[in-house]
Image (cartoon, helix red, strand yellow):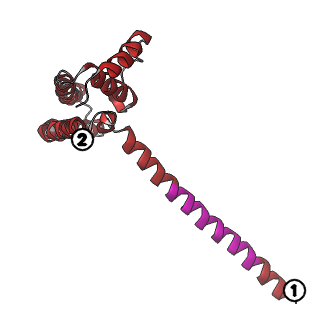
Amino acid sequence: MARGRTWLIISVTFNVFLVGGIAGALYRWMGDEHAIIAQQHRNIRFAADGLPPPDRKAFINLLREQHRDAMPLAKDAREGRRSVAQLFVAPQFDQQAIEAALARTRDADVEQRKRLEESIVAFAATLPLDERIRLAQGLQRRGSFQLPALPASTASVASAASASAPAR
């Protein structure tokens, strides 16, 4: 009888840990899925959600083209980071080589961001005021391209512009 009770306690304990592990893994898996969805909605392409469908599509195409054109710069930045990591663990610490690799990486990152920002500004120049305001509000909420809050005077201009804007 005592032996059966011992096995029962061991079995219940094991099952509690097993169920807890499965529940924890499921919670973690579901949590990661929600984090991925949330990250996708912070993506800069969602900044154009307030625009009419043709302009939204043009914005997304602009971002795709920009991404394709920036591939060599992204590759240079990745290689620079890899180089820095390798130089840090090299037997002989070469500060000048590390600084040069960091400078190349930084230059590639800055050039990539500059091109993206210039493309977005050129796109915004083609939009009427009410759509530019919606784009600016979308950019304010998205990723690393966040803008400061729009002043109250701009909000009143936006409502006036949207009220008087002709339908497209």
* Marks 1,2: beta carbons within 8 A: no
Judge by depth and name the residue closer to the eye, 86 or 23: 23
Give above or below for 158 relative to 50.
above
Q: Position of residue 51 (x, y in %)?
A: 29, 33
Magenta run includes residue 13: yes
Q: Residue placed farthest to the right in the image? A: 1
Three-letter code, disc 2: Arg
Q: Position of residue 37 (x, y in %)?
A: 42, 48
Q: Quadrant of the N terminus?
A: bottom right
Q: Residue at x 61, y 64 (%)?
A: 23
Judge by depth and name the residue closer to the eye, 131 or 119: 131
Q: Position of residue 4 (x, y in %)?
A: 82, 88
Considering the numbered disc 1 on the image, is that residue within a helix, a strand or a loop? helix
Task: Report which quarter residue 43 is drawn in.
Answer: top left
For residue 2, the mark is: 1
Q: What segment is highlighted magenta in the picture?
A: 10-30
Q: Residue placed farthest to the top in the image? A: 153
Three-letter code, disc 1: Ala
Task: Report which quarter residue 142 is drawn in.
Answer: top left
Considering the numbered disc 2 on the image, is that residue within a helix, a strand or a loop? helix
Q: Residue at x 67, y 68 (%)?
A: 17
- Mark 1 or mark 2: which comes first in sequence? 1
Identify the residue position indicated by label 2 in the image.
82
Mark 2 residue crowding within 10 angstroms, few (<14) / some (14–19) / many (20+): some
Mark 1 vs mark 2, CA separation in Å: 61 Å
- Dominant secondary structure, magenta: helix
